[in-house]
Structures are given as C-alpha cells and as structure tokens.
Image: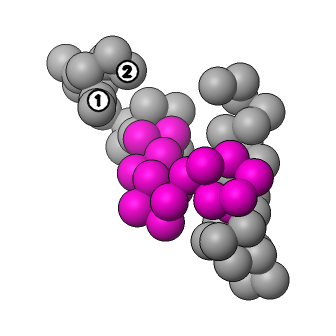
Amino acid sequence: MEQKDIDRIIEMAWENRTPFEAIKIQFDFSEADVIALMLFNAFFTNKFNTQSHKYDEQNFY
C-alpha cells in the first residue's frame, strides 16, 4: 500500500462525515484495521512515541 493511500485512510477516519463503511468499501479496511493502521502509522512515524524501539514494520502484524 502506498503512503498516499495510508494518508487518505487516516484522513477519512478523522473526518466526522466519513463512515467506516465507506472506508471498507473503498480500501477493504474494517474499523479495527483502520484503528490499527492509525496506531501503527503514529508509532512508526514518531508522531505518537519519540523513543526508539526494537520493533520494525515487518513484525507489527
């Protein structure tokens, strides 16, 4: 998945007007998938946690 798609999913999730069903139809991501993606993206882009970690993207799922 491209970063632009990830950014769009997160943007849609934050919008009050976009239901999770619309994200599911367009990207095949459930509400739980979107929440996990948002946490993952925040964690690995240092928007959520600024300390370095032993985890990498391959071991997240």
Task: State how far apart marks 2 and 1 are (Cα).
Answer: 5 Å
Name above or below for residue 40 compared with residue 39.
above
Pinpoint residue 8: horizontal percent, then vertical percent: 77, 48
Residue at the spot 50% in from the left edge and 60% down from the top edge = 30
- What quarter of the picture does the C terminus occupy? top left
Q: Can residue 7 be seen in this view?
A: yes
Task: State the mark number for residue 60.
Answer: 1
Q: Is residue 27 left or right of residue 61?
A: right
Q: Which corner quadrant of the image does residue 20 belong to? A: bottom right
Residue range highlighted in magenta:
23-41
How dense is the environment of label 2, judged by Cα within 10 Å: few (below 14), some, or many (20 and up)? few
Colour scheme: one colour
Residue 4 on the magenta segment: no
50 left or right of 46 in image: left
Q: Which residue is drawn at 42% across and 41% down?
A: 40
Q: In this view, does 36 lie above or below 40?
A: below
**Magenta-drawn stretch, dominant element (helix, strand or loop):** helix
From the top left corner, tell me how far across and down residue 41 is, in percent.
Answer: 51, 40
On residue 57, the disc is: 2
Instruction: Give the quadrant of the N terminus.
Output: top right
Res. 59 image quadrant: top left
Q: Tell me where residue 14 appears, x and y as whole percent.
A: 68, 70
Residue type, mark 1 in image: Phe
Instruction: Say what amino acid the circle numbered 2 marks.
Output: Glu
24 lies left or right of 15: left
CB contact under 8 Å: marks 2 and 1: yes
